[in-house]
Amino acid sequence: MKFFLLTSLLSVLLMALETANPKVYAALGDEVYVNAVHIKKLKALKHYASYADKIDNYIANVKKTKKLGYDVESGNHSNIKLDYLHQLRKHKNVNDYFLRSAQSTLKLALDTKDTSLFINIVNSKLIDTKLNRKIIMNYYKVHKKDINPDGIIQIYLDEDKDKAEARRNKNRWKQKAKKNLQEEKIARLRKNDKLDEEALDKKLSDELKAKKTKIRQEQEKELFN
């Protein structure tokens, strides 16, 4: 049982080491290593069929560089640190090439109305979807009957739905608040009117009492004189 647990733990640790990126020059390396996974998937697209060998070669070199990064990180091979940085910079150039290519491919898909290519490149994680959100969603609205929105488009649809619901709730709140203010104003006016009416009634009543008192006093004065 203990052996099984130890083996499982070692497997998890090895998996973590394989997926974690070297921390040395992480600002440069992280982008290269993360995008390498997405660049590899481009081979599945017909548009990138001619790039298959180049992509395979790039991915293989990135893996070697990543291993080199672990060696540098261990501190046992500090003399290869500059070589590691040099390799990362070379990979960054290739990485940037594929990012530009993905953006160009998006434009091509839009211009040729290639919906299949469009949805694949939109979900490739190699284009700036925030920057391209408007054109992505405009294309989707026109061709949505032919597009499965799973992926970034569905995320944006859900966000738009949430924003619309938030706007409706805000408008309902404003309308309710406005209605409450109006009702409070009406209640306040009615209360003031009632107070004014009561004040007027009291004034008239006091004046009538005063008049009656004066008349009675005058009558008493005449009677006893």
Image (cartoon, helix red, strand yellow):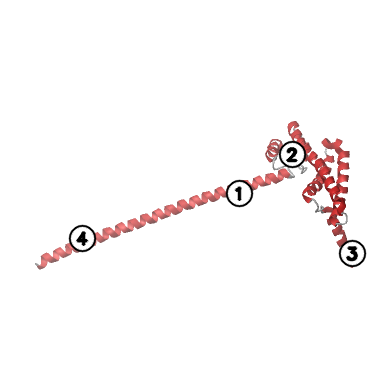
Q: Quadrant of the N terminus?
A: bottom right
Camera-side residue of 122 and 21:
21
Q: Which residue is mark 1?
A: 166
Instruction: Check disc 4: other Cα within 10 Å, few if <14, some if 14-19, many if 20+.
Output: few
Residue 1 visible at all? no
Residue pictured at 83% horizontal, 37% vertical = 48
Residue flagged by tag 3: what amino acid is it?
Phe
Q: Secondary structure at mark 4?
A: helix
Residue flagged by tag 1: what amino acid is it?
Ala
Q: Which residue is mark 4?
A: 211
Label 3 vs label 1, nearer the camera: 3
Query: How far is disc 1 from disc 2 in space, using C-alphas?
Result: 27 Å
Q: Which residue is mark 3?
A: 4
Residue flagged by tag 4: what amino acid is it?
Lys
Q: Earlier in the sequence, mark 1 or mark 2?
A: 2
Query: How far is disc 3 from disc 4 in space, using C-alphas?
Result: 109 Å
Camera-side residue of 13 and 169:
13
Instruction: Check disc 1: other Cα within 10 Å, few if <14, some if 14-19, many if 20+.
Output: few
Q: Quadrant of residue 39?
A: top right
Q: Which residue is mark 2?
A: 147
Residue at the front extreme, as displayed: 79
Q: Is residue 215 left or right of residue 49?
A: left
Q: Secondary structure at mark 3?
A: helix
Label 4 vs label 1, nearer the camera: 1
Q: Earlier in the sequence, mark 4 or mark 2?
A: 2
Q: Secondary structure at mark 1?
A: helix
Residue flagged by tag 2: what amino acid is it?
Ile
* Place of residue 216 in the rendered image (x, y in percent of width and height, measured from the top left): 17, 64
Q: Which mark is residue 141?
A: none
Instruction: Check disc 3: other Cα within 10 Å, few if <14, some if 14-19, many if 20+.
Output: few
